[in-house]
């Protein structure tokens, strides 16, 4: 099938790349979990104190001030604006690419979603606010429910411990699901 070892290596490299990229697609079906593509949920109004996906870095600093911590990432080129006590115990972070917010992560109850859900809210409050069109999955043993806005390309996930929210991610769907 392959004439040289280089062709076999190239084929395996391409196959691995396709599998990795395919695994990050939030619309791909994972039969090992109940992560099936649910009906669309409108997430277009999601914001944290008027900061939403695609807000600029100036929008973020105008609302929240200068970040307490800034983390620069080279590949892919991106910046995290982190607000809170320290880099491991913070309230919110914003992932920016090309100067625009691509992901928001809430890790304390200082901030709420547009529908009033915060860290510490009960799972039933999340479902009451966002509806029954969610998927379920687990990450590192923690249950997660998520919503897709397929029209606006937004994914929102809530991580839980004992049915209480422990973290909230709002992201452009080109990003993989977050780490809780």
Image: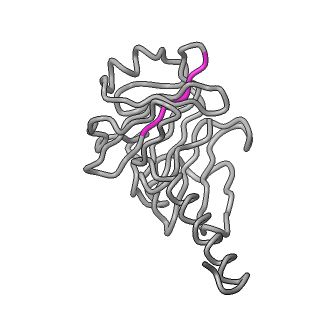
Total labels drawn: 0
Horizontal arrangement in the rendering, residue 48 relative to residue 131 (left or right):
right
Quadrant assignment for the C terminus: top right
Q: Is residue 122 above or below residue 57?
A: above
- Say if 42 sits above or below 117 in the image: below
Q: Position of residue 80 (x, y in %)?
A: 61, 55
Q: Magenta region's main secondary structure?
A: strand
Quick check: 31 left or right of 166? left
User: Image quadrant of residue 110?
Assistant: top right
Front-most of residues 67 and 78:
78
Q: Residue at x 71, y 83 (%)?
A: 6
Provide residue 117's location: percent of width, then percent of height. 43, 25
Residue at coordinates 50% horizontally, 45% vertically from top-left?
104
- Identify the image quadrant of residue 54: bottom left
**Position above or below: 58 against 164:** below
Front residue of 104 and 85:
104
In the rendered view, would you say 15 is above or below 152?
below
Is-magenta flag for residue 146? no
Report the magenta residues as a range. 156-161
Residue 120 visible, this angle: yes
* Outermost residue toward the bottom in this view: 3
Where residue 178 sits: x, y (%)? Answer: 56, 43
Q: Is residue 110 visible?
A: no
Q: Residue at x 61, y 19 (%)?
A: 161
């Amino acid at each position: 099938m392959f004439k040289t070892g280089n062709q076999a290596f190239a084929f395996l490299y391409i196959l691995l790349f396709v599998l990795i990229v395919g695994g990050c697609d939030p619309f791909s079906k994972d039969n090992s979990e109940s992560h099936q593509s649910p009906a669309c949920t409108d997430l277009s109004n999601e914001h944290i104190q008027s900061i939403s996906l695609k807000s600029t870095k100036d929008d973020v600093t105008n609302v929240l001030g200068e970040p307490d911590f800034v983390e620069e990432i080279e590949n892919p080129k991106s910046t995290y604006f982190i607000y809170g006590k320290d880099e491991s115990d913070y309230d919110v972070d914003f992932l920016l690419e090309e100067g625009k917010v691509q992901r928001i992560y809430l890790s304390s109850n200082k901030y709420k979603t547009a529908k009033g859900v915060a860290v510490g809210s009960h799972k039933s409050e999340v479902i009451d606010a966002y509806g029954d069109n969610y998927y379920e999955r687990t990450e590192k043993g923690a249950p997660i429910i998520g919503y897709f806005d397929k029209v606006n390309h937004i994914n929102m996930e809530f991580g839980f411990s004992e049915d209480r929210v422990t973290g909230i991610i709002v992201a452009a769907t080109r990003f993989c699901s977050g780490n809780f």
